[in-house]
């Protein structure tokens, strides 16, 4: 569906919302909606965007760099819970022709993300929780993550 952009005042542009869409989502005149950005898209919702739920990915056969970029991408996209499964115990780092354990690769990726933590792991499965909402219970974990990131940034070997 296409809509015209209307200038309203000096610094405001307006787009009308289809009445059927508003009715199907329970929106009424005078209510506020949340508008979020995802790349070149705008996301309209009744409440603030809180992530997209849970995803499970299989990293079998992927190299170290790809696994790290995948975890960072899923985190950035907004998943609340990321389950990683694999049949491998090692991942290749082609740049230095070395193998690293999958666990250390995941740990490295998570160490760079604020608000993410490995909450459980077994031989072939890792569960990463991402804190997307504010809460007092999660404040200590967030503060710990910030201090760990600061330590990593200033670490000298």
Image (cartoon, rainbow, N blue to C red):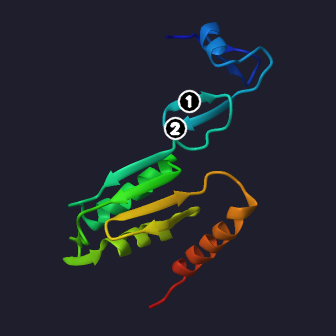
At x 45%, y 61%, the residue is: 127
Choose between 10 and 100: the one closer to the eye.
100
Q: Which residue is mark 2?
A: 38
**Gap in angstroms between the C-alphas marked 2 and 1:** 6 Å
Residue 99 placement, left or right of 14: left
Q: Residue furthest right?
A: 30
Residue 23 placement, left or right of 87: right
Asked if labels 1 and 2 touch by Cβ distance under 8 angstroms, the answer is yes
At x 66%, y 51%, the residue is: 133
Choose between 142 and 94: the one closer to the eye.
142
Choose between 86 and 91: the one closer to the eye.
86
Find residue 52 and report its horizontal and vertical position in percent: 52, 41
At x 76%, y 26%, the residue is: 32
Residue 28 placement, left or right of 52: right
Q: Which residue is mark 1?
A: 42
Task: Look at the image and tell me whether residue 97 can be seen.
Answer: yes
Name the quadrant of the C terminus: bottom left
At x 49%, y 53%, the residue is: 81
Question: For mark 1, does the 10 Å Cα neighbourhood hold few (<14), some (14 to 19), or many (20 or more) residues?
Answer: few
């Amino acid at each position: 569906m296409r809509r015209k952009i209307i200038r309203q005042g000096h610094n405001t542009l307006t787009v009308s919302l289809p009445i059927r869409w508003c009715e199907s989502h329970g929106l009424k005149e005078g209510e506020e909606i949340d508008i979020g950005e995802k790349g070149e898209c705008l996301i309209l919702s009744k409440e603030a965007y809180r992530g997209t739920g849970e995803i499970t990915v299989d990293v079998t056969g992927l190299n170290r760099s790809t696994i790290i970029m995948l975890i960072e991408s899923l985190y950035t996209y907004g998943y609340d819970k990321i389950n990683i499964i694999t049949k491998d115990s090692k991942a290749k780092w082609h740049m230095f022709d070395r193998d690293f354990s999958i666990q250390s690769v995941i740990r490295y990726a998570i160490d760079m993300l604020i608000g993410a933590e490995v909450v459980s792991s077994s031989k072939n499965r890792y569960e990463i929780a991402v804190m997307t909402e504010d809460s007092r219970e999660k404040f200590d974990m967030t503060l710990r993550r910030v201090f760990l990131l600061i330590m990593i940034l200033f670490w000298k070997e």
